[in-house]
Amino acid sequence: MLNPFPEAVSMKSSLQAKIDEVVAQHFPTLLNLLIVRQGSLVVERSYHEGNATASTNVKSITKSIISTLVGIALHEGYLTSLDQRLEEFFPQSFPTSGDQRKREINLRHLLTLSSGLQWDERAPTSLPSLYASADYVAHGLSLPLQHTPGEVFAYSTLDAHLLSAVLTRATGMDMLAFANQYLFGPLGSTITTWTSDPQGNRIGGSEIALTSRDLAKIGYLYLKRGKWGERQIFAEDYHAAATQTQITPGLGGYDAATYGYLWWVNTVGPYHTYYALGYGGQIICVLPDLDIIIVTTAPTNVPPEQGAGPQVFALPRQLTERIVLPLLM
């Protein structure tokens, strides 16, 4: 099944006008808005210079793609367990002296952004220092251990990138090629742009370019618990774990969300939801109880207070409350 949902069904002009009015009033920066309901693409609207079929850097949605690729690697036998330790893949990068708790970091810790490595995503030096280094993995593993692995959530592009490097080592494949073969190819898509580090590892926490329709397909794959047509892309038990609370951030500004395996987890009223969230307002929001997927893209050339502030984390809830529930249910 290459296309799980048909072209956007015809909307009444009155409904279209209401949606456009809500977007203009409450979500003025959105470029694209797609909503899939019961397998049909019921809303596909573009604003400003938006284009649902054009690829764009979806920023930290890349983290949720990495989670998906971990699930696939487990399903295909490239990985044996989430308890595999990072040291197994990069033994030369672990110091023989110093804090030996680093050796306890495993794949589950990376998926829950709880490696314990000293990292502050919003600090002005964290990402620039990583991106300026000659070896991202070595740089990351040279950082002090601030917490025992698995105990404390710290939002971290580094942790997600270490997973990308693990996948590259475990599969022996470039992650762009792996993603096209095992994920996007079966979904009827092909990706061509995903930035690499100096060693050729694709950036695990950002920098993949996808279309809004690609994002909707990822949401639909998760809505179907990892199944695409008759093909199980990744295991149902991985889907269940990835989209349920594994760790609680314990910080403000996340709209009370918890964290699964590189997916945010929350509720809107009585409805369970989980979502991938990228800087500026890139979103895949899945509402399984309602059989709904919401996708948005938005500009990324915005200051941090606009691109990663509380208002961005509130978007899945607000889109559900202002558009889905009053206009589509």
Image (tube, rainbow, N blue to C red):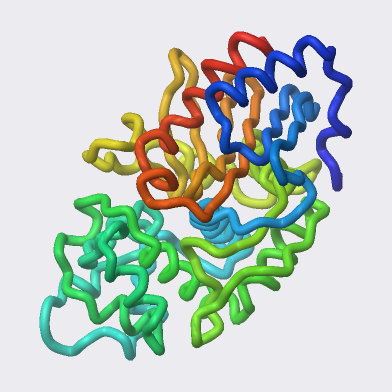
Q: Residue at x 56, y 64 (%)?
A: 207
> Residue 201, position in %: x, y?
53, 78
Left-right relation of 144 to 166: left
Q: Residue at x 67, y 64 (%)?
A: 179
Residue 190 position by quadrant:
bottom right
User: Looking at the image, which is closer to me, 329 or 127?
Assistant: 127
> Residue 193, position in %: x, y?
68, 69
Residue 132 position by quadrant:
bottom left
User: Looking at the image, which is closer to me, 242 or 318?
Assistant: 318
Left-right relation of 251 to 279: left
Q: Is residue 276 above or below residue 206?
A: above
> Residue 126, position in %: x, y?
29, 69
Q: Is residue 77 above or below residue 61?
A: below
Q: Is residue 164 above or below residue 302?
A: below
Q: Is residue 226 above or below residue 301?
A: above
Q: Residue at x 30, y 43 (%)?
A: 247
